[in-house]
């Protein structure tokens, strides 16, 4: 026995979109902040990421589907979660309690458990103006979800979706330094 306290566990939930391919450096930065990082992907996110490389980096398999109830869980329980990139679809479904993917099921449970949560939505400009999206963002914020969304950085036809990776790293570092409920230093 080494006597080293276990690191808190951060689930990084990735939705379908080009930024899902950028998770490696973000996961590494979170590890550098003292987190044990686990990646959970929506089925669409798998098209954009390298699950083998992420599993090698984190030491955990990338989960994307529900397991059979009799199977052991291959991931440790989370202390906090980040959703990046967070699609229009996932933000809206999450805000209204849909759990039709493993990612959404975990996010809904995290709300009920009061875990620290952050999301970085990546809608297009048109989808960001949709009433369901603005209502969903407001609803998630009312549940104390930190929604990092800057309408001035929206994707256009020429620009890729913007994920505020540095702000997300600051958020998870803050959770560690503040010893938020569910997050042990």
Image: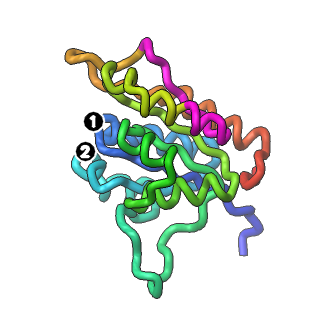
Give residue 7's quadrant in the image.
Answer: bottom right
Give the mark, 2 or 1, whose residue is nearer the N terminus: 1
For the point 57% across and 67% down, the residue is 76
- Front residue of this view, candidates 134 and 87: 134
Answer above or below: position of 43 versus 120.
below
Q: Position of residue 119 (x, y in %)?
A: 51, 38
Disc 1: which residue? 18
Along the horizontal axis of the image, is 146 left or right of 134? right
Callouts 2 and 1 close, C-beta under 8 Å? yes
Report whether 140 appears left or right of 129. Answer: right
Quadrant (top left/top right/bottom left/bottom right) for the N terminus: bottom right
Measured as percent of width and height from the top left, residue 141 is found at 62, 34
In the rendered structure, does residue 147 fall within the stretch colored magenta?
A: yes
Q: Quadrant of residue 147?
A: top right
Q: Nearer the viewer, residue 103 or 177?
A: 103
Q: Which residues are magenta?
A: 138-152
């Amino acid at each position: 026995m080494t006597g080293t306290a276990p690191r808190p566990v951060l689930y990084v939930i990735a939705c379908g979109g080009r930024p899902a391919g950028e998770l490696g450096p973000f996961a590494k930065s979170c590890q550098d902040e003292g987190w044990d990082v686990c990646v959970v992907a929506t089925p669409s996110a798998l098209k954009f990421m390298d699950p083998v490389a992420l599993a090698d980096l984190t030491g955990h398999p990338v989960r994307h589907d529900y397991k059979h109830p009799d199977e052991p869980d291959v991931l440790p329980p989370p202390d906090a979660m980040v959703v990046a990139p967070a699609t229009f679809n996932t933000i809206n479904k999450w805000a209204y309690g849909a759990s039709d993917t493993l990612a959404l099921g975990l996010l809904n449970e995290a709300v009920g458990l009061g875990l620290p949560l952050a999301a970085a939505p990546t809608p297009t400009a048109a989808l960001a103006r949709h009433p369901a999206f603005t209502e969903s963002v407001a609803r998630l914020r009312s549940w104390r979800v930190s929604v990092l969304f800057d309408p001035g950085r929206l994707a256009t036809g020429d620009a890729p979706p913007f994920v505020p990776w540095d702000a997300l790293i600051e958020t998870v570092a803050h959770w560690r330094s503040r010893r938020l409920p569910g997050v042990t230093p």
